[in-house]
Amino acid sequence: MIQKQTHVYRRPHKRRYTYSDILITAVLTLLVLLIFFPFYNAIVISLETSRAYALYPVSFLPMEWSLKNYSYLLQNGQILVGYRNTIFITAIGTAYGMIVSVMTAYAFSRPAFPGKRLLFSLMMFTMLFSGGMVPTYLQLKALGLVNSRFSIILLVGVSTYNIIIIKSGFEQTPASLSEAAKIDGANELVIFARIMLPLQSALLATFTLFTAVTYWNEWFWSMLMINSAHKMTLQTVLRSIVAEASADADIASGEAGLDAFSQGIKMAAVTMTLAPIMCLYPFLQKYFVKGVMVGSVKM
């Protein structure tokens, strides 16, 4: 006798949210709003007139739309000079920083070589102690790099933290891949360029973003090393605009009849400074998430 089997349909199990899930979601939502609202409010203020801002300092939409604050910045020309210099420094510096960091990390990820432990210890030492601001300035002055954009590129480019995490990523790659490539006749340069680098694309994209953001936001060494107005970076220009906007905006408004005002000019400058990085990040977000996971693996 053949027994007929019956299949019982079961509804997919729905996840039940606990009170802790609701609390965590509420706290994270509040944090997102607290972080997002200042950026959004800066954009709103930059698009308002001085009269609307005086009546409604905090609003969700501009009461009176105006592009005069952005027009004032573009006519001033200072921020465009900052863009030009910062884009140059970020492009050259990111390439320089990633080349040095990746090659150093790969060298330290290889089997032991004479002096490897000593060199790695010396590199780790720089995370705890630096040469100091004055010796660094004197060294760059002796090299003739004061008032040069290349001084910023050299100072910011190499990060010990980046090297350590990238080294960890290389060490996770199975050694059998390198051994198989060597049997096929590949040398270290071919293994590095055609095997190791493609496997670490997510990690490299993450630290390329980190390095680019570091260069884009750099202002301290730019303030110390750059003396000429035509070589100022975007962050030092922003600092100058925020410091001088009140007097300049009042004079410009009074003489030229512009509707620009000090707070609007400041917020327009902040928006123009942040916009490129904020637009770039969503395209690299998937690599960023993958790359951060590598940092949780032991060194």
Image (cartoon, helix red, strand yellow):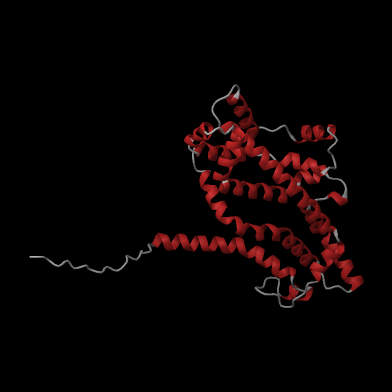
Q: Residue 147 versus residue 263: which sits nearer the camera? A: 147
Q: Residue 179 versus residue 156: which sits nearer the camera? A: 179
Residue pictured at 86% horizontal, 35% vertical = 144
Residue pictured at 74% horizontal, 71% vertical = 47
Task: Tell me the quarter of the image containing the N terminus.
Answer: bottom left
Q: Is residue 1 above or below residue 174?
A: below
Residue pictured at 86% horizontal, 65% vertical = 75
In the rendering, at what x and y percent does residue 33 appear? Answer: 57, 64
Q: Residue furthest front?
A: 184
In the rendering, at what x and y percent does residue 269 appear? Answer: 76, 61
Image-quadrant location for residue 187: top right
Q: Residue 183 versus residue 104: which sits nearer the camera? A: 183
Left-right relation of 44 to 137: left
In the rendering, at what x and y percent does residue 229 appear? Answer: 87, 51
Q: How many marks?
A: 0
Image-quadrant location for residue 192: top right
Left-right relation of 125 to 73: left
Residue pictured at 78% horizontal, 54% vertical = 234
Q: Is residue 237 visible?
A: no
Q: Is residue 163 above or below residue 246?
A: above
Q: Is residue 276 visible?
A: yes
In the rendering, at what x and y percent does residue 215 appear? Answer: 72, 48
Q: Residue furthest left?
A: 1
Q: Residue 53 versus residue 99: which sits nearer the camera? A: 99
